[in-house]
Image: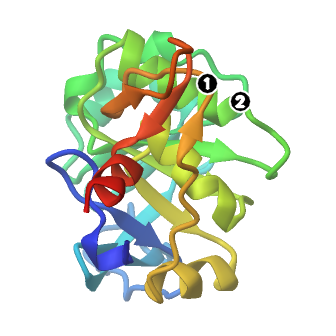
Amino acid sequence: MTAAEFEVGSGELYVTGMKGMTRTPDQSDPGIEGRETDMTKIFSNGQFFDEDWHTLEAEDVTPNEGNLLVPFERFLSDAETFASAGGRIAVLVGAGDEVEKLKDHLGRLAHIAVEFPKFTDGRGFSAARILREQMGYAGDIRAIGDYILDQVPLMRRCGVSSFQISKPEVLKALADGEWPEVTKYLQPVGTVEEVPAGTRPWARQSLREVSQAAE
């Protein structure tokens, strides 16, 4: 399966990276003067496009426009202000944050970014599953952080639908169509459609492998 062929349910696969480009500030708006945006390269259904998000720090004044990625605790402390902001709002969930606290705000978020601070930290997988399976969040869950290519299919299985890439080798591999699919699992999930594998009811088999075996 190539990257261009992959879709998440009826939605899209996003692969992002290439941070650090600066957008020229609107000098008429003091709220964003001198602000640096994180320009990301988005991959969707075989095509790339750019998207910019500004990660709001604790001391930053809330700007009147632009796409804002707001840390979890700061968003919850002033959710109504962010709800009335001019641009799109997304929340950055850190490792260990209680995502259940977002239940009253899910409909107003452009996406929820789940942080994977290092590839050995699995708490982001749990956060994504809680959002998808327990809370019924139907929007975009975006993985951010220091993870490796082999983890991307597992993130997708847990409900992640977009990826912000910090490792150039991961970005290149996905752009080249590499997809290290794991075809059998020992734990069922409610985020993707799978079939039982053999006689063990807890084991699951990817539909990709089933379709290939029938060909």
Q: Which amino acid does label 2 sit on?
A: Arg
User: Contact (CB < 8 A) between labels 1 and 2?
Assistant: yes
Instruction: Answer yes or no: is residue 62 visible.
Output: yes
Q: In this view, does 96 lie above or below 6?
A: above
Which residue matches tag 1? Answer: 126
Q: Which amino acid does label 1 sit on?
A: Ser
In front of the other: 77 or 187: 187
- Tell me the colour scheme of the image: rainbow
Direction left: furthest residue: 10
Which residue matches tag 2? Answer: 123
In front of the other: 158 or 66: 158
Q: Position of residue 2 (x, y in %)?
A: 37, 77
Q: In which quarter of the image is residue 50?
A: bottom left
SS for callout 2: helix
Q: Residue 87: give its label.
A: none
Q: Position of residue 39 (x, y in %)?
A: 44, 79
Q: How far apart are marks 1 and 2 (CA)?
A: 5 Å
Which quarter of the rendered picture does the C terminus lie within?
bottom left
Residue occupying image coordinates x 52% and y 64%: 164
Which quarter of the rendered picture does the N terminus lie within?
bottom left
Q: In which quarter of the image is residue 89?
A: top left
Direction right: furthest residue: 120
Q: Quadrant of residue 94?
A: top right
